[in-house]
Image (tube, rainbow, N blue to C red):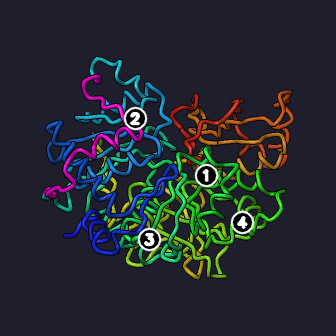
Amino acid sequence: MNLLIDIFEKNCKGKKGDKIFISYESKSYKFREILNLINQTCNYFDKFNLNKGDKITLFLENSIEFIVLYFASMKFGLTVNPSPVYLSQLEACNNIQEIKPKLIFCSEKFDFLKKRKTLSKKIVIIKNQNFIDSIKKFNNRFKKKKVDGEDIAVLYYSSGSTGKSKLIKMSHRAILNSQKIQQKSSLMDSGDKHLCVLPLAHTSSLRSTIKFCAFNHRTVYLYKNFWSLKNSILDVIEKYQITFIQTVPSILSMMTSIFSRKINTPHKVKSLKFVACGSSYLSKDVADKFINTFNTPIINIYGLSETCALSMTSYKEKKFTLNSVGKILPGLKYKIINEKNKISKKNESGELCVKTPAIFSGYINDKSKFIYNNYFRTGDIFTENNDGYLFYIERKKNIIIKSGINISAREIDTMILKSKLIKDVFTTSALDVFHGEVPISYIVPIQKKFNLNKLQNFCQRKLGDFKTPSIFKILKSIPKSPTGKIRFSLLER
């Protein structure tokens, strides 16, 4: 079968190769130039006696080096592990011990890894442009390794938003299929110039921006992160006539906060076809404020690291509301099942189960059963309306079962925010001897002088005694990933 790298190479032939693929730090790299760098990196890999199937880890921020190393690993037949750059030193070292990579490519920011005796010989320090210059001495032709579609191409980290992070095995077959699925989605209307500000270690930026553009012969304007251009992002959009941004709710909220009072804002972003939002729940309030400020449509994308994109809204349709994640994408099968494992009725909540050709190959060092009757259980609770639109409720694990009665953590969060005393909140379950589980809310007060009794009284009035959290934990901030997902493992229980 063809692999993603085969499609990419076809997009590098003839006149197609002259098109810009990546623009980074005021330098532009044509499709053909990136292919040459990929081939040179493959020959560079030979220097380390790497073999097909060996694992490598990337501890790199968004950069041209990341992209070249990522695609070169695919062509060479390696298994690449893009590591989130926000991990603590302890988390980074623990994950490496679990993966056991043969080599670790990291920026100078992560040179603490070199101080570990067990890792020091595996570390290759990447110094930005120095790496690109150094690999150019290698031959720009490389005979592709014979890679099977079922071979594992990538090890992704799950977000850890509901517990301990897992390492997700993704095959070459699944990666190719994820792109074929997206060819039947709203993303095909996203235009030719994509802005990438999400971390490249995050699955959505790789799948729906970098690999999407490699597969569909489009251009990516790559930046280190959103923070590096948050005050100038409108100028970037206007200068390069950006047509699409893959983003998350926190970035939409930040952009609205920065530019809502600026004049001429909609004019600067008029090249945008729409922005896509995923990874965490997009509230109507955040969406409405963004749309009113920028006059730019938003589409919702829903999917998991394990499944790739599953559903998507269309900016052209008028029927759906923004709290919908759209319809299941063509070619995928799904069902919503209730607590009795029976198919849920329309508008009845249940767990979404899917069958997709882009499904992952399992978890590394974890034999958890993830397939039920040939369907993957997403762990997410949805309803489906009569028109086939899906509405996300919340994670199944975040349904609190107190004395046998289900309590929605999101309902509690929504009400706590309405108190106007709290600027951020996350509610989940805590074990309780009498009730089995009770709600526990992690809260970030707006003011330093905070009266917890006032919040408790508010919750009891609005939620009742039964749903009011039994435990409140006051925090300075709730630990989240750069894409806005709760880092559950870092919360005190």
Q: CA distance from mark 1 to mark 4?
A: 47 Å
Disc 1, disc 2: CB below 8 Å? no
Q: Foreground residue, 192 or 315?
A: 192
| Mark nearer the N terminus (2 vs 4) | 2
Circle 3 residues within 10 Å: few <14, some 14–19, many ≥20: some
Q: Secondary structure at mark 4?
A: helix
x and y percentages locating residue 128 in the rendered image:
42, 39
Indicate the quadrant where residue 262 lies: bottom right
According to the image, label 3 marks what residue? 335
Indicate the quadrant where residue 282 lies: bottom right
x and y percentages locating residue 475 in the rendered image:
69, 30
> Amino acid under label 4?
Lys
Q: Please check the rendered image and state whether residue 120 is part of the magenta-colored stretch, yes or no.
A: yes
Circle 2 residues within 10 Å: few <14, some 14–19, many ≥20: few
Position of 256 relative to 334 (above/below): above
| Mark nearer the N terminus (3 vs 1) | 3
According to the image, label 1 marks what residue? 406
Q: CA distance from mark 1 to mark 2?
A: 52 Å
| Mark nearer the N terminus (1 vs 4) | 4
According to the image, label 4 marks what residue? 268
Please identify, in this view, whether the residue under mark 1 or under mark 4 is nearer the observer. 4
Say if residue 377 shows up in the picture.
Answer: no
Name the quarter where the N terminus is drawn: bottom left
Please identify, in this view, whether the residue under mark 1 or under mark 2 is nearer the observer. 2
> Amino acid under label 3?
Lys
Looking at the rendering, the stretch of residues picked out in magenta corresponds to 119-145
